[in-house]
């Protein structure tokens, strides 16, 4: 029982981690707290669904198309909206991200309606059992994807020239301009990457659950993950995802019987409250310090 | 003439007049100093040349700036950086979450040179500022003030500028450190042939390495002369406002 709950927690946690990564990327590059991440997850899953079922081509053609469209969506959002919001109050920016969220949910309803869709099997079959417990392949795949993406991100930011430029912009935009780096382009790119990661998370979730409008609710569930890990820490997002995922799944098993059904969904918010009281910058977040 | 600033006037927010009328010219390979008290318009002048005024809601409202014979005052900041005008802004604009070596690498990103040429340049920076080599893997935020200043200068040299604009490199540094930084700036000019426009309040530091100096008061050039001539006059008259630019 414990092991099963633990594995389920790690699997759900790795999806949380993926989605949290997207939020952290955007926050690092442009200090925008993106409340529309959940809606991006949802629309990404719908886009992938539409491309995979709509285009009669093998997956190695359709999946890159879906990924490309997601990246394009990110660039469009940045170019049309956030490019004009530099130096605007934080609260206004947050409202705009909520607005985007409503816009995406509304458009999805208009295009696909409110039905449940079952997502086509796009992940290769894989069976795995641990100590006699069978583990669903979707869980394994989401774990593998989040680990691969985490490693790719780490290498990208450490060794690639573009990664270095993105870190420079995230660190100090004025200094970046004087070093010949265009902040707008880098922020655009971080929106693109963030949308791609959201789409991958969305496909995982749609494989675990069903494809419907409810997917965007993940944005709120992931928020405690980002706060726990620290808004600007990639490793924090990943560890935060696992911690919240495991705690949620353990509490569902052990406290669910005592307190009724959905205790696992409450637990993450209880954790959020405690973190905000004890460690407001998260486990790995940067504390703003000013040195004279 | 590598840089020619002609009759510029600069406003911030369309209402604050920061520069009334300034003319500056620099020959290839020279070090030229802008001296003057706080608020005289020295830093604004560097921002006007580098194009970074736009970030601070400032604008050149009159006059022209020519770099290598081409007019640049209409260009954006990044285009000017790419044409070879590089600014070391005041306040040590570090990329504080990056390591020392990463900071230097970011400087080299605009160049098209091969990796081995850039690696040689990195080693050259470490010979100019040996302390940076010891600190190479350290996050730059942890450096002392003097080391931070050395790092931002070295990072800008990694861009291989044709014209280096330096805004008060001695500000807030202990006298010995400030002198060391100034002497490395001189060495860079001598060895790499980089043309330098140096803004300083500390005339005693700046004059010995300069070919020419301007004194700025109230957004105008009050005096332009050789360092030898400058030493004969009492600069305090200009710093304290007893003498100012003739209008």
Image (spheres, coloured by chain):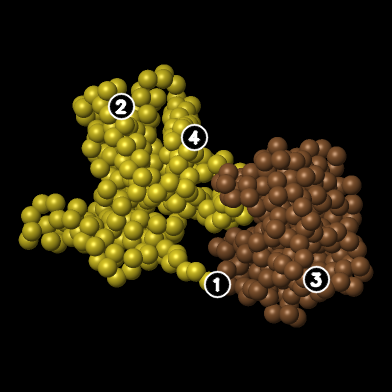
Chain colours: A yellow, B brown
Q: Are marks 2 and 3 on the same chain?
A: no
The residue beneath circle 4 is A79
> Marks 2/1: CA distance?
49 Å
Q: As rendered, which of A242 and A268 lies closer to the eye? A: A268
Q: Are marks 2 and 1 on the same chain?
A: yes
Q: Secondary structure at mark 3?
A: loop
Check whether the beta carbons of the residues at disc 2 and disc 3 lie within 8 A of each other.
Answer: no
Q: Residue at left 28%, top 39%?
A: A216
Mark 4 or mark 1: whose residue is earlier in sequence: 4
> Marks 3/1: CA distance?
29 Å
Mark 2 or mark 1: whose residue is earlier in sequence: 2
Q: Secondary structure at mark 1?
A: loop
Indicate the position of residue A206 as horizontal and vertical percent values: 29, 37
> Marks 2/4: CA distance?
19 Å
Q: As rendered, which of A164 and B46 lies closer to the eye? A: B46
The residue beneath circle 1 is A292
Chain of the residue on which disc 1 is drawn: A
The picture quadrant where one finds residue B158 is bottom right
Classed neighbour count for the residue bearing mark 3: other residues with Cα under 10 Å, few (<14), some (14–19), many (≥20): some
Classed neighbour count for the residue bearing mark 2: other residues with Cα under 10 Å, few (<14), some (14–19), many (≥20): few
Above or below, A86 against A8 in this view is above
The residue beneath circle 3 is B235
Indicate the position of residue A151 as horizontal and vertical percent values: 50, 53
Q: Residue at left 31%, top 31%?
A: A103
Chain of the residue on which disc 3 is drawn: B
The quarter in which the C terminus of chain A is drawn is bottom right
Above or below, B150 against A194 in this view is below
């Amino acid at each position: 029982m414990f092991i099963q709950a633990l594995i389920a927690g790690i699997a759900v946690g790795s999806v949380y981690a993926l989605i949290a990564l997207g939020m952290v990327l955007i926050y690092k590059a442009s200090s925008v707290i993106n409340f529309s991440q959940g809606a991006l997850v949802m629309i990404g899953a719908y886009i992938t669904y539409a491309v995979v079922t709509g285009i009669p081509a093998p997956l190695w053609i359709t999946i890159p198309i879906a990924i490309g469209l997601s990246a394009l969506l990110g660039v469009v959002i940045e170019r049309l909206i956030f490019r004009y919001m530099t130096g605007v109050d934080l609260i206004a920016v947050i409202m705009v991200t909520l607005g985007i969220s409503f816009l995406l949910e509304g458009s999805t309803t208009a295009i696909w309606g409110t039905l449940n869709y079952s997502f086509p099997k796009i992940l290769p079959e894989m069976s795995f059992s641990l100590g006699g417990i069978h583990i669903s392949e979707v869980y394994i795949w989401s774990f593998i994807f989040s680990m691969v993406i985490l490693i790719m991100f780490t290498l990208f930011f450490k060794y690639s020239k573009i990664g270095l430029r993105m870190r420079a912009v995230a660190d100090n935009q004025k200094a970046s301009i004087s070093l010949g780096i265009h902040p707008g382009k880098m922020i655009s790119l971080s929106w693109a990457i963030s949308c791609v990661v959201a789409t991958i998370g969305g496909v995982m979730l749609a494989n675990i659950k069903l494809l419907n409008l409810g997917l965007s609710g993940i944005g709120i569930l992931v928020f405690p993950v980002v706060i726990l890990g620290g808004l600007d820490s990639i490793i924090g997002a990943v560890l935060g995802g696992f911690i919240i995922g495991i705690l949620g799944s353990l509490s569902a098993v052990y406290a669910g019987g005592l307190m009724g059904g959905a205790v696992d969904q409450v637990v993450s918010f209880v954790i959020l409250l405690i973190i905000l009281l004890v460690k407001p910058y998260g486990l790995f977040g940067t504390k703003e310090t000013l040195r004279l | 003439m590598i840089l020619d600033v002609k009759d510029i006037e600069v406003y911030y927010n369309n209402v604050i007049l920061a520069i009334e009328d300034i003319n500056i010219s620099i020959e290839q390979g020279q070090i030229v100093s802008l001296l003057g008290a706080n608020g005289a318009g020295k830093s604004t002048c560097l921002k006007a040349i580098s194009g970074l005024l736009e970030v601070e809601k400032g604008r050149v409202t009159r006059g022209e700036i020519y770099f290598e014979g081409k007019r640049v005052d209409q260009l954006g900041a990044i285009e000017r950086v790419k044409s070879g005008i590089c600014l070391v802004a005041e306040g040590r604009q570090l990329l504080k979450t990056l390591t020392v070596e990463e900071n230097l690498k970011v400087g080299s990103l605009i160049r098209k040179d091969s990796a081995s040429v850039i690696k040689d340049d990195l080693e050259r920076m470490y010979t100019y500022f040996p302390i940076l080599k010891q600190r190479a893997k350290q996050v730059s935020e942890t450096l002392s003030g003097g080391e931070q200043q050395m790092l931002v200068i070295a990072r800008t040299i990694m861009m291989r500028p044709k014209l280096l604009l330096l805004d008060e490199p001695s500000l807030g540094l202990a006298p010995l450190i400030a002198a060391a930084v100034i002497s490395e700036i001189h060495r860079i000019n001598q060895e790499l042939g980089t043309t330098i426009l140096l803004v300083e309040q500390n005339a005693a530091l700046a004059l010995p390495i300069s070919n020419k100096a301007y004194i700025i008061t109230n957004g105008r050039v009050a005096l332009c002369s050789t360092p030898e001539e400058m030493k004969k006059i009492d600069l305090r008259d200009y710093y304290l406002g007893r003498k100012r630019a003739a209008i």
